[in-house]
Amino acid sequence: MTGLQDRLTPEQVEEFGREMDELRARIVADLGAADVEYIHNVIKTQRGLEVTGRALMYAGFFPPAWLAGVGALSLAKILDNMEIGHNVMHGQYDWTRDPALSSQRFEWDNVAPAENWRHSHNYIHHTYTNIVDKDRDVGYGILRIDPAQRWHPYYLGNPVYATLLAIFFQWGVMLHDLEVDRVVKGERKWSEFREERRRIGRKMGTQIGKDYVLFPLLTGPLAPLTFAGNAAANLTRNLWAFGIIFCGHFPADVESFSEEETEHETRGQWYLRQILGSANITGGALFHVLSGNLSHQIEHHLFPDIPARRYPQIAGEVRAICEKYGLPYHTGPLRKQLWSVAKKIVKFALPGSGDSTPEPATVERDRTPAAA
Amino acid sequence: MAIRAAVRRAAARSGTQASSLASLAERLLTPHGVDRYLELIDPMLVRREIRGEVVALRRPTRDSITLTVRPSRAWQGFAAGQFVRVTVDIDGVRRTRCYSPAGSAHRDGELEFTVKAHEGGLVSRHLHEHGHVGMVLGLSHADGTFALPEQRPDSIVLIAGGSGITPVLSMLRTLVDERYPGEVSLLYYARTPADMPYAEELDELASRRGVRIHVRHTAADGHFTADHLRRVAPWFARATTYLCGPPPLMEAVRTLYADAGIAGQLHTEEFTPPVLTVAASEAGGRIRFTRSGVDVANDGRTLLEQAEDAGLSPDHGCRMGICFSCTQRKVSGVVRTASGGESAEDDEEIQLCVTAAAGDVDIDC
């Protein structure tokens, strides 16, 4: 496989970085009322679905109403966590100076407290994207997803861990922010996370309180049905978020990197790593919104703080720049990407799966080392 | 007696019921909170935030607009002379400026803001061009120490220039409303009669007992002199004085009071930002915004301006050192403030809008 540093000459990398910077500057200069109107509409839809879902639970004895309620509530939670929460907490709307859209103040409908998540996601994952041993999102500390991770008998359970993570994804994210895997391994001390634990305790209390105590109690005799409905909505959101997120960095042809090759990275090289380490998912407009536009993972990783509605608008241009420099632009439909991730999870459970042959990328790669 | 006690108990009970209902609603609608849902029905329904709806609007002069604003339920009133941070959305971005309500503090169910359109003034121009009945503004609680004290002074002098009339007019109207027994005089400077937003109101107030008002038009009769003050308030040396206006007026009055040895009786409010730049020769060094990981060469302008130019968007309000919205922690370095002070203290809270760096400075922002 071509190494990160020798795909392009240093001059090409800088030129490529400049083109990306220019693209970014053009979008930033164009931000305005239309972006705010868009996110307000998404928020309105989310709140409407949430209220509808809660209300339908009062008719939960009628199965179609219960199902519709679960559907509405699932969609509300998905929109809240992905197109609204994830993106607002990236600072995509900080320029509006609206406290309700402030990355520092926003809290999402999820047991993982926003503040813990912002550190592990915005800082660790987005800075060290796909650098094995630095980006804690590579396998989330519990899975073996990359040949560079050394095999251990523990990884025989890979498919089981992945399934459990999918089902309990919001709890997984919460524990991930707490670096529980590293605490268990003795790399970090439990006492280092006092602040984080305090926040988690409070957040768990309010989240469990509303979904599993207050709303069920308010429906009186229907409490068990409401309880089950709320659990089903949380489960749907968990499965969906897991699916979208795992397709972002783990499909077969996405690359990972070592600490050595990413030392002293320039801005251009950082952009390059984001492109090589991310994969898009193709789909319709509604699919993009429900994925929080993480279906444009490449554009998101290039410009994590630009409003996500802009990603589809610039995708063509990003892809054209990739083609110009002979860089791959990983993309595919959801089922293809999911299947590819599933195969990887099973394959890396077994020993002797050290080296992988990448599947052909969507865009032809220039495989001649370009280094002068 | 028994009936009254029962009524009181019932009122207390319904109060507790309402508040426990509100707290249940907050628990159900966590993490976003009740306001984020109510505002989608009507922006004025919010319980915690304060908003104001424009219920009347007039244009008293060519370049000023007077908005009558009905605040939402969280509003707690103001002391005459205080200011409110008013927020509007301009092309998707929230912009906040400080304005002093001009009405009586005893009639705080409706607030009156008179805004003069400044050349290049983003918010004032926006209000002029887009202000309309039904417009909803963001409001803060009233703030500021430029206000009439609870214990009213025995005699009061008010001096204002231009749009600085608003806080002192609020003081005057408040005093008239409460039948203030002492003497109160207003000395007001406007450029021409056409630049006076409150001509009729001042005429009416001048007819009240104990109130003296003297208006001077600077285009025709020149600027502040001690004679003007003596004519309207010969007893000013034993009065408490409230002053708000453009910098030359402020300076002239300050000098007079300092010379007379009564500077302690003068209270002032700046309406225009003091000019602050550290001379280029002394500027130098680098400003590091440590939390954002941004590092810029110091050019001597205010830290707020330099932070904004570096792509940061720190919280701020008045941009003139009044409102403390832009307060951040300075980790280290020497800074100079608009009032002329210099400080090298570590871990010090500073107002970005009226502070400039003299050499290397680290700010936790």
Image: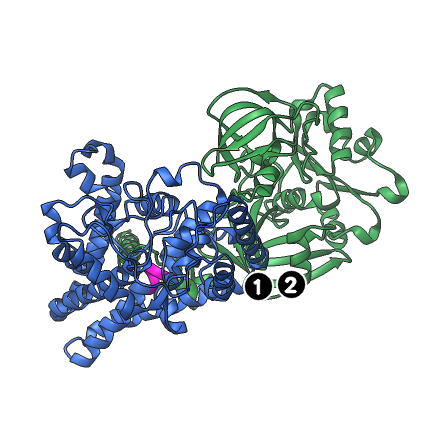
- In the image, B259 versus B118, the foreground residue is B118
- Percent position of residue A206, x then y: 24, 52
The relative height of residue A79 versus residue B188 in the rendered view (above or below) is below
Q: Which residue lies furthest to the right in this view?
A: B220
Tell me which amino acid carries mark 1.
Met
- In the image, B235 versus A2, the foreground residue is A2
Can residue B365 be seen here? The reply is: yes
Disc 1 and disc 2 in contact, CB within 8 angstroms: yes
Would residue B33 be counted in the magenta stretch? no
What chain is tagged by disc 2?
A: B
What shade has chain B been given? Answer: green
- Percent position of residue B110, x then y: 56, 56
Element at label 1: loop
Mark closest to the chain's N terminus, 1 or 2: 2
Element at label 2: helix
- Percent position of residue A343, x then y: 20, 62
Q: Nearer the viewer, mark 1 or mark 2?
A: 2
Can residue B18 be seen here? The reply is: no
What chain is tagged by disc 1?
A: B
Residue drawn at the location 70% of the way across and 24% of the way down: B281
- Percent position of residue A144, x then y: 20, 50
Please, what is the dominant secondary structure of the magenta stretch? helix
Magenta region: A79-83
Of the numbered discs in the image, which one, if any, rests on residue B135?
1
What shade has chain A been given? Answer: blue
Which residue corresponds to mark 2?
A: B130
Q: How far apart are marks 1 and 2 (CA)?
A: 9 Å
